[in-house]
Image (spheres, rainbow, N blue to C red):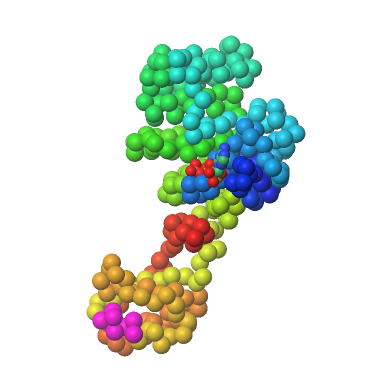
Amino acid sequence: MIEVVSLRKSFGDVPALTDITFKVEKGQIVGFLGANGAGKTTTMDILCGCIGADSGTARIAGFEISENPIEVKKRIGYLPDEPPLHKEMKVEEFLLYVGQLHGLTKAKSKQRVHELMERLEITDMRNRLIGHLSKGYKQRVGLAHALVHDPDVLILDEPTEGLDPNQIVQIRELIKSLRGQHTILFSSHILSEVESVCDQIVIVDHGRVVEQGTHQQLVSRLESGRQYQLRVRQGASTLVEKLKSLPALSSLALDPENEQTISFRTSDQDQVLDRVAQEVLSGGHGLQELAVKSKKLEDVFFQLTH
Ligand code: ATP
């Protein structure tokens, strides 16, 4: 549904995008994850036809953006970091106006706006001036604005930025509830958010896509051997010294936060785990736990962007 190949964009001598390539399948929620200045907004602005790329191609539902901007705009809903809301208009009045700008008949626009206001829980605010709404409600109106014409693709630029914790949860739940009906590209620099909301993750760094996959795929692709956690009853520091003689272990260390706990990494699990267990038993250390320690998205992100 979204296909981007080798996008490049500079602002004067500032290279914002150097190689953005990724794909989003129909119905997926994809997290576009990157630090400040990584190139997320620039990519989204290009996808929505707000700015042009210097080179590369971007297709939405098969339409190349620079060749068919009108067809693309019909199929896309955009919630930019500053939603384009008319502060002096009332919520319902504004949404009806947006519906008509998209070419919906008055009746169709009314039906759609009422559906969306119910769904986004803003019906009670329909006669309020947009300028008087809280940030969370403005964000919901922005989301309704992006959804009025029932677009195939929804592009959301940091939709939870600046919201309080309750509003963040509500907006995330709203986005999750749109899964399957729209293809969603959703930018964030909050790793836990991307992890909880998205089916796929695209990691962007210094204007380049450095990885794409599910959370699990990203983690396992970057694991050089599995990391294990070993907890014993006593003598963990002596045990670490003994385990140093095992050649297939790496990153062997006492865990500073958990007493009597050792972490290590190995890719040769069958052979090595037996040897580790023998050392624990023969030394009388008392085996309490030997478990795989799963890697978090934070580790993956840090590894890819440093
Ligand atoms: P953030 O998370 O802070 O919003 P981002 O990943 O969205 O960051 P972009 O806003 O796309 O990053 O910016 C990418 C790079 O391009 C940055 O170095 C930024 O300073 C630069 N940039 C973006 N827009 C312009 C502009 N209009 N003029 C000059 N430089 C720009």
Residue 7 lies, in percent from the top left, at 67, 46
Which quadrant holds the N terminus? top right
Q: Which residue is drawn at 51% across and 46% down?
A: 37
Query: Is there any visible trace of residue 274 in the rendered image?
Result: yes
**Which residue is most to the front?**
13
Q: Residue at x 39, y 29 (%)?
A: 135
User: Is residue 37 placed above or below 224 in the rendered structure?
Assistant: above
Query: Which stretch is magenta?
Result: 235-241
* Ligand 1 falls in quadrant: top right
Q: Nearer the viewer, residue 71 or 280?
A: 71
Residue 260 lies, in percent from the top left, at 27, 74
Q: Nearer the viewer, residue 222 or 49?
A: 49
> For the stretch drawn in magenta, what is the main secondary structure?
helix
Q: Residue at x 44, y 74 (%)?
A: 265
Residue 126 lies, in percent from the top left, at 42, 16
Residue 227 lies, in percent from the top left, at 43, 70
Q: Which residue is drawn at 51% across and 37% down?
A: 157
Whether residue 7 is in magenta: the answer is no
User: Is residue 174 placed above or below 190 in the rendered structure?
Assistant: above
User: Is residue 2 placed above or below 75 in the rendered structure?
Assistant: below
